[in-house]
Image (cartoon, rainbow, N blue to C red):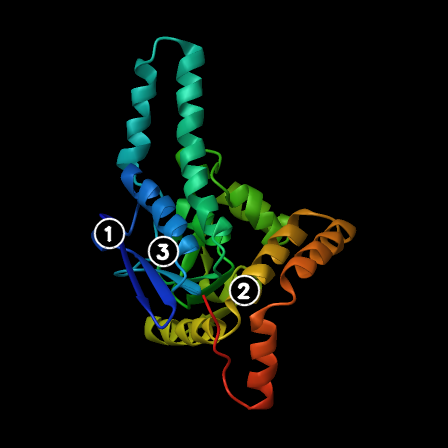
Amino acid sequence: MSYSAFLVRTDQHIATVSFNRPTKANSLPEPAWEELHQIFDQLHEDPEVRVIILTGEGKNFCAGIDLETLMGLQRFEEIACEGRKREKLRHFIFKLQAAITAIEDCRKPVLAAIHGACLGGGVDIVAACDMRYCTEDAYFTIKEIDLGLVADIGTLQRLPKILQPGIVAEMAYTGRKVGGSEATAIGLTNRTFPTHAELLAAVTEIAATIAKKSPLCIRGTKEMLLYSRDHSVAESLNYMTAWNASMLLSNDLKEAFMAALQQRDGVFEG
């Protein structure tokens, strides 16, 4: 399918989703958020896709929500009833949140390959990814504070699960830039690469390694990691028993053992 703000392509079980508004620093107008949701819902269901790379065309990764969309919030002022006005605004925020949550809810691992600017909503988006990698020239900014806003679509909820709370607070209160090397030092990204080409080559190699594993087990691993993030150890262990009791005795288990014995890659269903 074609999209107004994204390029999507699949090769060797790897889907690459690229923000595609390079002349606008890959900022996202309102329809793009609906496309983002749609894309990840489709990839969630696509049996040919086993892992996803999220990146940006041009010089930047993503500058978040575009200014026209923010200015368009004035349309809610035209609603006379205060209750209905607030209800509509809340629904709008829910829509943006849902688009990002679709990344987290996608059963396939999502690897963010970040270069240039990752601002505002871009930070919300990468916080929902499973892994983040960046270039040395990348920088991350929780920009909302400079726009008179409280970041409201995921950054303040997900980043404290990734970084030390004090680091998140500093970024959120000051709006300062966190460069690529610092991002890796504080744990926001897994690794930093000197160039965009090296970043994409490395992330593609990691994605290819994941794509060779049992898709059933990769999906289960993502589900367990997210569940454990939000639950106690005891609850997570209990849930693990339910998952393994349901999924352990699979064709993938037999194939993985045979592949190991024969020193070859496993051949798995989607």
Q: Which residue is outermost to the right?
A: 234
Asked if the residue under mark 2 is in contact with the one under mark 1, i.e. CB atoms within 8 Å, the reply is: no
Say what amino acid the circle numbered 1 marks: Arg
Give the x, y percent position of residue 27. 30, 47
Front of the two marks 2 and 3 = 2
Q: Note whether 229 is above or below 77 in the view shown.
A: below
Per the model, the C-alpha gap separating discs 1 and 2 is 34 Å
Q: How dense is the environment of label 3, judged by Cα within 10 Å: few (below 14), some, or many (20 and up)?
A: many
Decide if residue 259 is on the left or right side of residue 153. Answer: right
Say what amino acid the circle numbered 3 marks: Ala
Upstream in sequence: badge 3 or badge 1: 1
Q: Please, what secondary structure does the residue beneath circle 1 have? A: loop
Give the x, y percent position of residue 210. 49, 72
Q: How dense is the environment of label 1, judged by Cα within 10 Å: few (below 14), some, or many (20 and up)?
A: many
Per the model, the C-alpha gap separating discs 3 and 1 is 13 Å
Task: State whether residue 113 appears in this view.
Answer: no
Residue under the image location 24 percent in, 52 percent down: 21
> What residue does disc 2 label?
216
Residue under the image location 30 percent in, 37 percent down: 30
State the mark number for residue 21.
1
Upstream in sequence: badge 2 or badge 3: 3
Q: How dense is the environment of label 2, judged by Cα within 10 Å: few (below 14), some, or many (20 and up)?
A: many
Per the model, the C-alpha gap separating discs 2 and 3 is 35 Å
Pick whichever, 169 or 191, lies toward us. Answer: 191
Q: Note whether 27 is above or below 250 in the view shown.
A: above
Q: Please, what secondary structure does the residue beneath circle 2 have? A: helix
Upstream in sequence: badge 1 or badge 2: 1
> What residue does disc 3 label?
117
Say what amino acid the circle numbered 2 marks: Leu
Give the x, y percent position of residue 75. 29, 21
Give the x, y percent position of residue 223. 59, 55
